[in-house]
Image (spheres, rainbow, N blue to C red):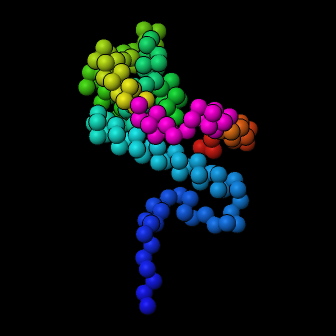
Amino acid sequence: MNKPQSLTKPPTPDLETRLVEEDHHSIKLWLRLLTCSSLIEAELRSRLREEFDTTLPRFDFLSQLQRTPQGLTMGELSRRMMVSGGNVSGLSTQLVKEGLVSRSTLPEDRRTYIVKLTPNGKKFFTNIAKRHEEWVIELLGDLDHDDADQLAALLAKVKTTASKHSTPTGGRQ
């Protein structure tokens, strides 16, 4: 006799599906954090692509410039975005071609470029940022204010502990 099929759909495999009961609680927490971050990031990437035909790195690049109207050097953009100079240079070139940013040399050091949002870039980013905020609120909206505060406080402890045990370059050589 055949066993009846379950009426519930099996859970979608994610990073936590590899866990076993004996795994240390820190491993379980790490994979839970990574899974949550990956789910949210994937959804934001998808929505940015579908609604604005743009990417998360481009959003982050424009966001950094929006927060610093006087502009940023390429090196500072690279540090803030935690990516290589080559990545920043490639993004900058694309965004200059699209008229969203301007790039000019510093008068005192012609080897250093400063990047700023153009008026078109400000308008474009303002529209994206508004939707991005709505999406984040939607994705995390089931947490009430107290839950969010409690989670933020616990994640602050995680950040402090991880920072205390981290190398200055985050393990990168």
Asked where in the image residue 16 lies, by quadrant, the reply is: bottom right
Q: Main secondary structure of the magenta part?
A: helix
Give above or below for 33 relative to 126. below
Q: Residue placed at 73% from the left, 40% from the top?
A: 161
Q: Residue placed at 38% from the left, 17% from the top?
A: 116
Q: Residue placed at 45% from the left, 72% from the top?
A: 6
The percent coordinates of residue 23 (x first, y second) are 68, 63
Give above or below for 124 relative to 69. below
Location of the N terminus by quadrant is bottom left
Q: Which residues are magenta?
A: 134-153
Q: Is residue 58 visible?
A: yes
Q: Most extreme residue toward the left, as rendered?
A: 98
Residue closest to the eye, 30 or 164: 30
Q: Is residue 159 visible?
A: no
Q: Most extreme residue toward the bottom, as rendered?
A: 1
Give above or below for 104 relative to 56. above
Residue closest to the eye, 45 or 3: 3
Give above or below for 50 relative to 121. below
Is 136 colored magenta in this rendering? yes
The percent coordinates of residue 57 (x first, y second) are 41, 35
Location of the C terminus by quadrant is top right
Q: Is residue 66 left or right of residue 165?
A: left
The percent coordinates of residue 111 (x first, y second) are 43, 19
Residue closest to the eye, 172 or 152: 152
* Tally of numbered discs: 0
Residue closest to the eye, 135 or 159: 135
Is 144 colored magenta in this rendering? yes
Q: Residue placed at 47% from the left, 16% from the top?
A: 68
The percent coordinates of residue 17 (x first, y second) are 54, 63
